[in-house]
Amino acid sequence: MEDSKKVMFEIFRERDGGAYRAVYFTELTEHEKDDALSEAFSGEHIYSGYLLHRERERAKATVNHLLDRLNAGEVISEQEIGCALDGVSV
């Protein structure tokens, strides 16, 4: 059975060389969406995609680990991010 529920997300770097962050768009309330979209789109795009809903907790843990590495100064390619999320994203 195919997992039809997905969590749309983006990894971005805050404007002017700030911290790397992730936003999970489909989990935001209507009130939060405008601010989150504005912040993400004004930052530097790093990676975006969809996480499988049934794997979202494991996927978020992986994203958090990637963010820790990025914020520590490690350079991680888009391909490496995709590989790290293999099996929990589409």
Image (spheres, helix red, strand yellow):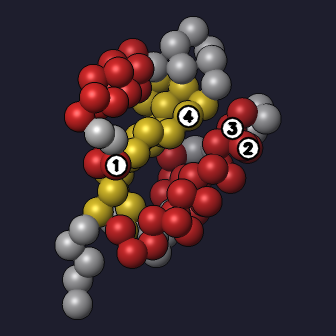
| Residue 58 sits in quarter | bottom right
Nearest the eye: 14 or 77: 14
For the residue pair 17 and 35, the one nearer the viewer reads as 35
Gap in angstroms between the C-alphas marked 4 and 2: 11 Å
Tell me which residue sits at (57%, 9%) in the image: 16
Work out which quarter of the rendered image holds the N terminus and state it.
bottom left
Q: Which mark is residue 27?
A: 1
The residue that appears at 36% across and 68% down in the rendered structure is: 52
In the image, what residue type sits under mark 2? Arg
What residue is disc 2 on?
69
Q: Residue at x 56, y 34 (%)?
A: 21
Tell me if label 2 and label 1 are in contact, CB under 8 Å: no
Horizontal arrangement in the rendering, residue 11 relative to residue 7 (left or right): right
Mark in the foreground, 3 or 4: 4
Name the amino acid type tagged 3.
Answer: Leu
Q: Which residue is mark 4?
A: 21
Q: Give the secondary structure at mark 1.
A: helix
Disc number for residue 70? 3
Tag nearer the camera, 2 or 1? 1
Residue 44 lies, with reference to residue 2, above or below; the image says: above
Secondary structure at numbered mark 2:
helix
